Image (spheres, rainbow, N blue to C red):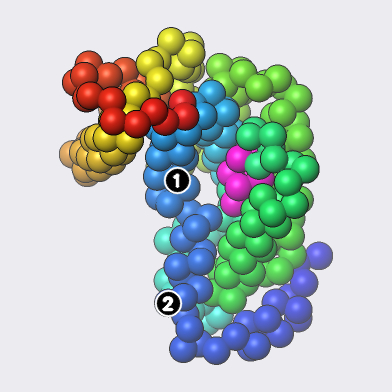
């Protein structure tokens, strides 16, 4: 089921000298890159659609960590690792493959680009590269990443049906998934992100449609720079409250709510319109 022999063939076919490139590719399915991608997309493009995908990503965290812990299937032996694994000890299904499918596939779906062959091809390429990078790095078997992609597709279809395009329903689903994950896995970084993020998203998402549209490229640049600074500042507080689960939940709630409400704060700066942009 996990395709051990096929995984070995993939690892052996890829030169270890390019390990840094593989790490870069695998990071495209990691929490940090996906968070900044979605946050920037939310600030600069269609907010409601991007917020919906953010809710999918938060909900997916709760689902995947609980499922991996419940199945309890270990990663490959450490002698296969090209780099040290910073994740949990569970290998099935692959969280990176799942997350890449949910986010990149979710963006194509939410933005109505499922009939755009270039958008579909681009998202598919990213998902396949992230999935294969996990096998090349030796932290997953091929069967793990295939299962992660399949689960991601099923999850997307289910969330599309449950939410009906409403981010508030997405964050409500994320909250519902985060609670059993907290019970099954305990107070880990992932479960606290899922719980705090879903709470912050649920509280802030009702105001998305009331936020002002971007009036200029300058305002978009200010929003992006200020937003990234806000995210970095909040993330910097993690070390201060580390070990305090309620404080971390509150911190992640503030982080998600701040990302969603940032356009309203920047609007108060009254940056003059230089050129109209799409909201």
Q: Nearer the viewer, residue 52 or 211?
A: 211
Residue 47 lies, with reference to residue 204, above or below; the image says: below
Q: Which residue is mark 1?
A: 37
Q: From which residue to which does the magenta span run?
A: 100-107
Crowding at dot 2, Cα within 10 Å, few <14 / some 14-19 / many 20+, comes out as few
Q: Residue, x 57% and y 28% (percent of image)? A: 49
Tell whether position 102 is magenta: yes
Main secondary-structure element of the magenta-colored stretch? helix
Q: Quadrant of residue 169?
A: top right
Query: Looking at the image, which is closer to me, 150 or 189?
Result: 150
Q: Is residue 174 left or right of residue 267?
A: right
Reading the image, the residue beneath label 2 is: 20
Residue 158 location (% of width, % of height): 75, 31
Mark 2 or 1, closer to the camera = 1
| In-image side of 172 versus 220 (left or right) | right
Residue 245 rendering spot, x and y as whole percentages: 34, 31
Q: Is residue 125 visible?
A: yes
């Amino acid at each position: 089921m996990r395709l051990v022999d096929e995984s070995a063939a993939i690892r052996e076919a890829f030169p270890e000298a390019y390990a840094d490139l593989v790490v870069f590719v695998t990071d495209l399915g990691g929490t940090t890159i996906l968070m900044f991608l979605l946050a920037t997309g939310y600030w600069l493009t269609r907010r409601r659609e991007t917020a919906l995908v953010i809710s999918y990503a938060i909900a997916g965290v709760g689902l995947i960590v609980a499922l991996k812990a419940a199945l309890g299937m270990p990663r490959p032996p450490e002698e296969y690792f090209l780099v040290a694994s910073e994740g949990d000890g569970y290998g099935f299904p692959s969280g990176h493959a799942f997350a890449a499918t949910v986010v990149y596939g979710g963006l194509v779906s939410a933005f109505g680009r499922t009939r755009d062959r270039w958008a579909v091809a681009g998202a598919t390429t990213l998902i396949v590269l992230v999935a294969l990078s996990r096998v090349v790095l030796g932290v997953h078997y091929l069967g793990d990443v295939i299962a992660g992609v399949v689960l991601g597709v099923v999850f997307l279809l289910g969330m599309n049906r449950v939410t009906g395009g409403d981010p508030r329903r997405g964050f409500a689903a994320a909250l519902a998934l985060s609670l059993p994950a907290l019970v099954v896995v305990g107070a880990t970084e992932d479960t606290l992100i899922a719980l705090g993020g879903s709470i912050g998203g649920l509280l802030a998402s009702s105001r998305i449609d009331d936020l002002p549209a971007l009036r200029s490229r300058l305002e978009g640049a200010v929003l992006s720079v200020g937003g990234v600074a806000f995210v970095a500042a909040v993330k910097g507080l993690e070390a201060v409250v580390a070990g305090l689960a309620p404080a971390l939940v509150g911190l992640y709630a503030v982080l998600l709510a701040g990302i969603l409400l940032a356009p309203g704060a920047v609007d108060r700066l009254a940056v003059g319109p230089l050129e109209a942009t799409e909201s």
